[in-house]
Image: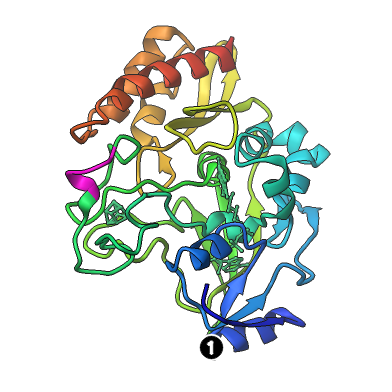
């Protein structure tokens, strides 16, 4: 790892000023430090934002405001989150390991980089790491890569479980940048690769995530993750779903998929099919088919289409039983 300078920001404004001078934010370091060891990231100066006073979880008029420095473990076990947003708690607990969740922050979790093995190997080309160098994953190892929304330039998937839950229930990310504060909705923070896969999000350089705000509670919600082993593994496929029922009819379905795209994928086609329908296996299968019609699997990941159909159908059936 290359030598770097380390400092702690005294407040958010000081952190943003340091970033304007070229510093890189450090949250829990569970992703960034790994990438520094691999030579993928080579910051000369780190500004630690994990100890900023952005560590509260507060109830608001409409939902919940979560500071960007809140640790994943604390968020997952917060009583209000467990009761009103079980999908978020379950998604967090499905990620990484207990030790990692104790360190990882909300801000860092949202901005963690893809686990594509070519991205993490500096001896290989990769458009995301070195724009214009090519995408070896397209013809190479891509079993875990995208089936939706990918481009000829990048077929990587977004790795965060938490972001999939936030994309389903809907959230707002609060950001402080060189030009002041602004808010960005989720979905909307992460972007599809297009011809600029080096940009994972719509954030500008130096933007500091200060908080994430949740909207309406989703007490009937759940997260299901399929992975190659029971813990310490990223999603091959995942689904976050929140459903509201009235008199045996679905009044609202909010669904997002993980492990299928460069973004946490909001399943709007599936949601449209379900509005006003009775919660039957046929309706859920129809919804899954509507969403997956746009799938463009790669040579070795066509299995994800059937997997997604099965898991989505079953998850919705259990959630509405
Ligand atoms: C072995 C292993 C298994 C894992 N398994 C999973 C899994 O199954 N599911 C899952 O979702 N995750 C998994 N993870 C990833 C883990 O969740 C992330 O590493 C973690 O959430 C990142 O948070 P952090 O605070 O440590 O971020 P850091 O590593 O500190 O930072 C990540 C990025 O965010 C930026 N950043 C940090 N805070 C801010 C801020 N406030 N504003 C703007 N930018 C900021 C940093 O500059 C950096 O670019 C795993 C990690 C490991 C090592
Ligand atoms: S899929 Fe994306 S991250 Fe992976 S090698 Fe291709 S360009 Fe790089």
Question: Residue 5, how many percent across, how many down?
Answer: 62, 84
Q: Is residue 61 above or below residue 227?
A: below
Look at 42% across and 22% down and name the residue there: 274
Q: Quadrant of the C terminus?
A: top right
Q: Could you tell me what secondary structure mostly forms the magenta stretch?
A: loop
Q: Is residue 237 above or below residue 194?
A: above
Q: Is residue 128 above or below residue 59?
A: below
Which residue does the numbered mark 1 point to in the structure image?
Answer: 20
Label 1 CB, ligand 1: below 8 Å? Answer: no
Pick whichever, 40 or 152, lies toward us: 40
Look at 60% across and 39% down and name the residue there: 95
Q: Is residue 141 visible?
A: yes
Q: Quadrant of ligand 2?
A: bottom left
Question: Residue 288, how many percent across, how many down?
Answer: 35, 22
Pick whichever, 134 or 267, lies toward us: 134
Residue 166 picture quarter? top right
Span shown in magenta: 137-142
Look at 78% across and 61% down and name the residue there: 55
State yes or no: residue 36 in magenta: no
Pick whichever, 1 or 192, lies toward us: 1
Secondary element under disc 1, as helix, strand or loop, is: helix
Left or right side of 23 for 150: left
Look at 75% across and 66% down and name the residue there: 54
Residue 266 picture quarter? top left
Question: Residue 106, how many percent across, how many down?
Answer: 65, 56
Left or right side of 65 for 232: left
Question: Residue 82, how many percent across, how many down?
Answer: 75, 34
């Amino acid at each position: 790892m290359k030598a770097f300078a380390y400092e702690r920001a005294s407040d958010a404004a000081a952190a943003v000023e340091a970033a304007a001078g070229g510093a890189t934010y450090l949250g829990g370091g569970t992703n960034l430090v790994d990438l520094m060891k691999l030579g993928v990231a080579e910051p000369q100066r780190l500004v630690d934002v994990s100890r900023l006073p952005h560590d509260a979880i507060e109830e608001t008029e409409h939902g919940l405001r979560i500071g960007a420095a809140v640790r994943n473990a604390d968020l997952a076990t917060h009583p209000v989150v467990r009761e009103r947003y079980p999908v978020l708690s379950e998604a967090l607990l499905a990620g990484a390991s207990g030790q990692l969740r104790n360190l990882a922050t909300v801000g860092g979790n949202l901005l963690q980089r893809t686990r594509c093995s070519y991205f993490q190997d500096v001896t290989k080309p990769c458009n995301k790491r070195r724009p214009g160098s090519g995408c070896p994953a397209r013809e190479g190892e891509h079993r875990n890569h995208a089936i939706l929304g990918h481009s000829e330039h990048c077929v990587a998937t977004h790795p965060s479980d938490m972001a999939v839950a936030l994309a389903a229930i809907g959230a707002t990310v609060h950001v402080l940048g060189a030009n002041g504060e602004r808010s960005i909705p989720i979905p909307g923070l992460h972007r599809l690769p297009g011809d600029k896969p080096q940009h994972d999000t719509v954030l500008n350089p130096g933007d500091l995530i200060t908080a994430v705000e949740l909207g309406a509670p989703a007490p009937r919600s759940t997260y299901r993750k399929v992975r190659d082993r029971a813990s310490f593994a990223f999603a091959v496929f995942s689904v976050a779903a929140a459903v509201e029922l009235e008199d045996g009819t679905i009044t609202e379905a909010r669904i997002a998929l993980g492990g299928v795209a460069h973004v946490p994928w909001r399943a709007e086609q599936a949601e449209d099919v379900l509005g006003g329908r009775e919660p039957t296996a046929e309706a859920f299968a129809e919804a899954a088919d509507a969403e997956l019609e746009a799938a463009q699997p790669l040579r070795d990941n066509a299995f994800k289409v059937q997997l997604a159909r099965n898991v989505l159908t079953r998850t919705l059936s259990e959630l509405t039983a």
